[in-house]
Amino acid sequence: MGDRQGMVNAPEAVRRMMADDAASRLLGIEVLDCADGRAVARMRVREDMVNGHGIVHGGLVFALADTAFACACNSWGPVTVAAAAEIAFVTPGRIGDELRAEASVRTRFGRTGIYDITVRRGDEVVAEFRGRSSTLRNGPS
């Protein structure tokens, strides 16, 4: 992840966070772009990522969107975590699909932010995710 152009240009806080993100690394999630409340991440659906119906497990679609969300809300610098999130699955992903999550800030107020993340396969929407973030007062505990 760290060698990709998007990570080279990402804010330092995001580069540090992603360097320690073993879960995203395990899933093969790559951050392609990140700055000022927005981020783009992608993941290729592998055979070990599908459920009993042969479609990508919803939790893994959520994980991709959550990684893009984390990068977008941490792009401002202070340590920021998810306070809540919801996802609507629109169409299933399948083995071999490249899924791309695009996150953008909707609004920030106090220590809270709201972000929308769209997960796509090409031009087709796979899922819509909305996350609410909370900036920690004193960093991680």
Image (cartoon, grey):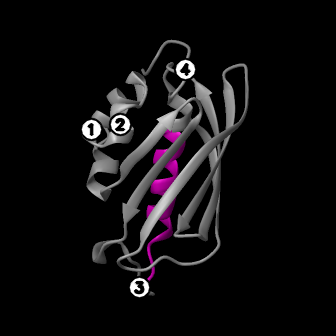
Q: Amino acid at mark 3?
A: Gly
C-alpha span from label 1 to label 4: 25 Å
- Badge 4 crowding class, 10 Å Cα cut-off, few under 14, some 14 to 19, many 20 or more, is some
- Tell me: 70 left or right of 31: right
Residue under numbered circle 3: 52
Circle 4 — which element?
loop
Circle 2 — which element?
helix
Residue at horizontal 68 percent and vertical 32 percent from the top: 113
Residue under numbered circle 4: 136
**Callout 4 touching callout 3 (CB < 8 Å):** no
- Name which quarter of the figure residue 43 lies in: bottom left
Residue 121 place in picture, x, y as percent: 51, 70
Residue at horizontal 45 percent and vertical 42 percent from the top: 33
Residue under numbered circle 1: 2
Residue 128 vs 115, above or below: the answer is below
Residue 82 vs 101, above or below: the answer is above
* Numbered tag placed on residue 105 in the rendering: none
C-alpha span from label 2 to label 1: 5 Å
C-alpha span from label 2 to label 4: 23 Å
C-alpha span from label 1 to label 3: 33 Å
The residue range painted magenta reads 54-71
- Tell me: 63 left or right of 128: left
